[in-house]
Image (spheres, helix red, strand yellow):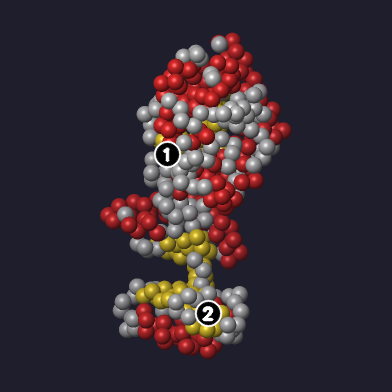
Amino acid sequence: MKKRILIRFGDMMLKGQNIGFFIKRVRKHIMTALADLSVTYVLRHDRIMIDYDLGEETVLIERLKRISGIHDFSIAHVTTPDIEAIIKEGILLLDETAIKDGTTFKIETRRTNKSFPMTSLEITQNVAKEMIKGTKHHLVVDVKHPELTLYIEFRIEAAYLYVDRIKGMGGYPYGTGGKGLLMMSGGIDSPVAGYLAMKQGIEVELMHFESTPLTPIESVQKVIDLSRILATYTMNQNITLHLVPFAKLHHAILDHIPEPYMITIMRRMMYRIAERFTKKKKIYALINGESVGQVASQTLQSMQVVEAVTKLPVLRPLITYDKLEIIALSKEMGAYDISIKPFNDCCSIYVPKQPVTKPMELYASKYETYVPYESLIEAAIEHVITIQIHAKDTWEMSTYGFEVKEAFDRYQKEMSEMV
């Protein structure tokens, strides 16, 4: 029995004359992701097909699920493109499928080989009766709402039969949508926002505002662990994380800004830092995990006041998602258990009792004059630590804590001398 993986593209098929560019990028990403496996490729204008070692099937499936641009894929039985062979292979496939007697069933045939004398409907009619008769299961035909569908793709070189369509990421190939900077916290929302941006082809770099000793160093460990998960969705399994020393600016905000405006001012400072840091980089947008109304600082009026300090577009992939939808995505991508670890970041360590929900830019600008933020921003940018995170890296706290805490201590000492 021969098997082959059939990969389908989804939205990319709507790209018209540019579809070739997108398909080439997906091919490149697949070949990079599977470079260490025993695979060969059959390339078509509307499909990528993969021949593989059956022992590596589970690994293949998991890796293909993490490649944006793949709408779905199937593990197909392969046979010669003639009716008798299709019937024989179809019976074998139905027999190995875990179904019960009385399962409702239909066959869908897609014929790309137009030289074959039968239409798709005629092929279905010719094979259905014999398959039902030959299988060890008792199947009931239901063409409208079947529990099981057997798909047949009838091509010149072979016929492909499968019953499952395994969901991929969808969207567009990673990197085809330009580059954005993800405002990365250690919570649930921002990693999911990053995942959705990557799904649409946006290459992301990550920026985390760390406030040790106001926040525990373990909060940075969370961010590194979440970064490793996002790295699995990149072509090279590698992602860039920028750690911004935010403690001095954080202290100044807590000491001098009226409590209701603390979060508003803090986020405005973060946007200023992000924009200035990316000025010489080819980064075209900021990305965050905001969702309308989820917390007091995520009202439309608040978003407008916060993003007024930057000229970069601000993308919010989660803008219409509710918390349960976000949690479901977080669990699906494997980030949830890390995100809920009890180590607060700078946005959650000191939450005002009554944060302003309808801030005014006039007041935000006025309160910012209470803080010498220009020098603090420049110092923070100067002391950013950039780490390349690889999906396969293992960051043990004993090792990570020693090496990076040493760097934190160094730049915090330098900043205390400057301010």
Residue 111 sits in quarter: bottom left
419 or 88: which is nearer to us?
Answer: 419
In front: 153, or 418? Answer: 418
Residue 220 position within the rendered picture, expressed as x and y whole percent measured from the top left: 62, 32
Mark 2 element type: strand
User: Circle 1 is placed at which residue position?
Assistant: 315
Residue 264 place in picture, x, y as percent: 49, 27
* 112 left or right of 265 in image: left
Label 2 Cα neighbours within 10 Å, binned few <14 / some 14-19 / many ≥20: some
The image quadrant that residue 158 belongs to is bottom left
- Residue 92 makes an appearance in the image: no
Locate the C terminus by quadrant.
Answer: top right
The circle drawn on residue 227 is none
Q: Is residue 21 above or below residue 127?
A: above
Which type of secondary structure does the marked residue at label 1 adopt? strand
Amino acid type at mark 1: Leu
> Which of pointers 1 and 2 lies earlier in the amino acid sequence?
2
* CA distance separating discs 1 and 2: 45 Å
Identify the residue at horizontal 54%, vertical 20% (top origin).
258
Tell me: 367 left or right of 113.
right
Place of residue 227 in the rendered image (x, y in percent of width and height, measured from the top left): 56, 40
Q: Taking 388 as reference, is 20 above or below it? A: below
Q: Name the residue rendered at 35%, 73% in the picture.
A: 112
> Which quarter of the rendered picture does the N terminus lie within?
bottom right
Q: Is residue 189 visible?
A: yes
Q: Which amino acid does the dot numbered 2 rest on?
A: Thr
Residue name at image x 52 percent, y 34 percent: 296
Considering every residue shown, the one lying at the far left of the view is 17
**Residue located at (48% from left, 17% from top):** 367
Name the residue that disc number 2 marks. 104
